[in-house]
């Protein structure tokens, strides 16, 4: 009953017994391509199946290892609902309302306004920092995290710890 191209799980790969209500078959745990009615049938068929099983198991393992996650810890872009990239260079935080959007949506936004709060986008770093501090005063967790990260990069660890601690208390899991 065995061949080189075994992909049917409706019968035992060793003895050929067909799956039914009375006969329960168990899939090969390595490749999931063949089934067996008993441990003895599995042992008898092992020499014939070993090479194909290992090859398929490697493919399954690679698929599991290299599959991209369905979403990231950052969630989805609130505009296009595509999962946010883990790479921070592929997203932008709007300075006026602290919303994180993907670069694609930022690029598609032709207006010089925020797609959420409709505030004009800041034209300078000073205006952007001013808006961020307003969001910090309003206890916005994302703004607190961003300010804490900025302070840490500047070497101001005391204030960085203060901002990041407050962001965590406000529920921002990324501030850890």
Image (tube, grey):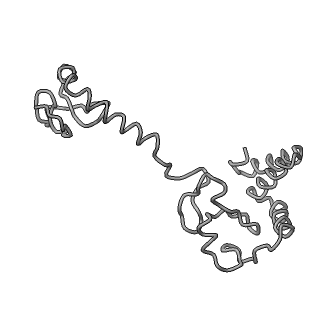
Relative to 170, residue 130 above or below: below
Count of marks overlaid on the render: 0
When asked about the image quadrant of residue 147, the answer is bottom right
Expressed as whole percent of the image width and height from the top left, the position of residue 159 reads: 88, 48
* Front position in the image: 132 or 137: 132
Expressed as whole percent of the image width and height from the top left, the position of residue 89 reads: 66, 57
Q: Quadrant of the C terminus?
A: top right
Q: Quadrant of the N terminus?
A: top left
* Front position in the image: 22 or 37: 37
Q: Is residue 21 left or right of residue 143?
A: left
Q: Is residue 172 left or right of residue 130?
A: left
Residue at the extreme bottom: 111
Expressed as whole percent of the image width and height from the top left, the position of residue 129 reads: 84, 64
When asked about the image quadrant of residue 6, the answer is top left
User: Which residue: 43% across, 41% down?
Assistant: 64
When asked about the image quadrant of residue 38, the answer is top left
Q: Is residue 164 left or right of residue 78?
A: right
* Front position in the image: 66 or 138: 66
User: Which residue: 87% across, 67% down?
Assistant: 126
User: Which residue: 63% across, 52% down?
Assistant: 87
Expressed as whole percent of the image width and height from the top left, the position of residue 55 reads: 31, 33
User: Which residue: 60% across, 69% down?
Assistant: 105
């Amino acid at each position: 009953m065995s061949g080189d191209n075994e992909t049917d799980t409706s019968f035992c790969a060793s003895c050929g017994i067909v799956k039914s209500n009375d006969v329960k078959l168990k899939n090969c745990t390595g490749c999931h391509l063949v089934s067996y009615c008993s441990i003895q049938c599995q042992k008898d068929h092992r020499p014939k199946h070993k090479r194909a099983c290992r090859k398929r198991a490697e493919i399954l393992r690679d698929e599991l290892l290299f599959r991209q996650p369905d979403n990231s810890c950052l969630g989805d872009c609130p505009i296009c609902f595509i999962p946010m990239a883990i790479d921070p260079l592929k997203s932008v935080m709007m300075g006026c309302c602290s919303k994180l959007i993907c670069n694609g949506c930022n690029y598609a936004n032709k207006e010089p306004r925020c797609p959420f709060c409709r505030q004009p986008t800041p034209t300078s770093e000073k205006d952007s920092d001013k808006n961020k501090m307003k969001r910090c005063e309003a206890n916005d967790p994302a703004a607190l995290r961003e300010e804490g990260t900025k302070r840490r990069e500047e070497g101001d660890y005391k204030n960085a710890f203060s901002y990041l601690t407050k962001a965590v208390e406000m529920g921002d899991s990324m501030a850890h």
